[in-house]
Amino acid sequence: MPVLKPIHPDVLTWGALGCSVASAVLLSFAQVNRWLFLVIPMLLFFRIALNALDGLLAQATGKARPFGEVL
């Protein structure tokens, strides 16, 4: 993961949180705009990917902390 080393794992965590919030907002508007049901799964996939990368990056760079799993 040499490309991600300059990025702090918390940035990926906040990105995953942003994907979750965006999914919730889009879900609230999906009643009117049905096409949003196609976007929500993609955002949730990115959330899961960012969460996985967050943990891998934290361990690879030595920035892992005991509370990190909770985040």
Image (cartoon, helix red, strand yellow):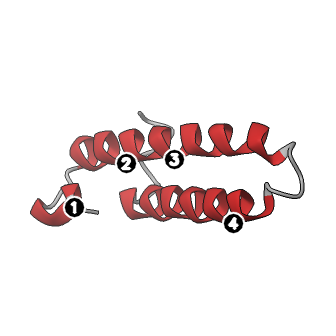
Dots 3, 2 in contact, CB < 8 A: no
Which residue has dot 3 on it? Answer: 47
Residue mark closest to the camera, 3 vs 4: 4
Depth check, mark 4 against mark 2: the one in front is 4
Mark 4 lies on residue: 25
Quarter that holds the N terminus: top left
Q: Is residue 61 left or right of residue 34?
A: left
Taking the image as drawn, is residue 35 in sight? Answer: yes
Disc on the earlier residue, 2 or 1: 2
As drawn, the label of residue 54 is 2
Of the residues shown, which amino acid type is indicated by label 3? Arg
Q: Tell which circle, 4 or 2, labels the residue nearer the N-terminal end.
A: 4
Q: Residues within 10 Å of mark 1 (few under 14, many from 20)?
A: few
CA gap between label 1 and label 4 equals 24 Å
Badge 4 element: helix
- Looking at the rendered structure, which numbered label has been put on residue 18? none
Q: Give me the residue at 15% from left, 65% from top.
A: 67
Query: Helix, strand or loop at disc 1?
Result: loop
Asked if residue 58 lies left or right of residue 2, the reply is: left
Farthest left residue? 66
Extreme front residue here? 31
Give the Cα separation between the discs numbered 4 and 2. 23 Å
**Viewer-proximal residue, 60 or 36?**
36
Q: Which residue is mark 1?
A: 70
Q: Nearer the viewer, residue 22 or 54?
A: 22
